[in-house]
Image (spheres, helix red, strand yellow):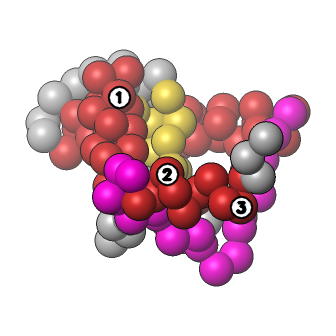
Amino acid sequence: MVRLNTLKPRLQAATNTRLAPAPTAMVERKRGSAGVRDRERIRLRDCGLCQACAVKGITAVGIDVDHKIPLWAGGSDHESNKWLLCTTCHNEKSAAEAKRRATGELIK
């Protein structure tokens, strides 16, 4: 049986990639009914429209409430760090963030 603390350095060396640094203080995400209310406030504030598409001059229905700066990169769970995105924009943003996180690059 391999212990986790010995496996992690081996995996890191084997893949030759850096692990994403942990944020200095982990922010707790709102869950349950508080999270539902929070997401509804963001949907109302953003008028149900994708904010990334709006910047490009496109009108699209927003589906996902997303953190502009991810919690893992030091973003807050405050309303000012959230926006409504369509599924396409959310998937593109999430994929780009996952790639940055995998290489250890923090999002600015």
- Disc 3 designates what residue? 5
Q: Position of residue 80 (x, y in %)?
A: 53, 61
* Comparing labels 2 and 1, the label whose residue is closer to the camera: 2
| Callout count | 3
**Highlighted magenta segment, given as a residue range:** 14-32
For label 3, the SS is helix
Q: Where is residue 94 in the image (x, y as percent from the top left)?
A: 38, 38
Q: CA gap, disc 2 to disc 1?
A: 27 Å
Q: Can residue 52 be seen in this view?
A: yes
Could you say which disc has been placed on residue 91 in the image? 1
Residue at the spot 50% in from the left edge and 42% down from the top edge = 66
Q: Residue at the right extreme?
A: 33
Residues under numbered marks 2 and 1 in contact, where contact means CB atoms less than 8 Å apart: no
Foreground: 37 or 14? Answer: 14
Question: Is 73 rendered above or below residue 95?
Answer: below
Q: Which numbered disc flags the more N-terminal residue, 2 or 1?
A: 2
For label 2, the SS is helix
Q: Is residue 19 left or right of residue 100?
A: right
Q: Which numbered disc flags the more N-terminal residue, 3 or 2?
A: 3
Q: Can residue 101 be seen in this view?
A: no
Residue at the spot 66% in from the left edge and 32% down from the top edge = 40
Q: Position of residue 59 (x, y in %)?
A: 23, 25
Identity, as a three-letter code, of the amino acid under mark 2: Leu
Q: Quick one: label 1, few (<14), some, or many (20+) residues within 10 Å?
A: few
Foreground: 63 or 4? Answer: 4
Question: Is 71 rendered above or below residue 62?
Answer: below
For label 1, the SS is helix
Identity, as a three-letter code, of the amino acid under mark 1: Asn
Could you say which disc has been placed on residue 11 in the image? 2
Foreground: 14 or 68? Answer: 14
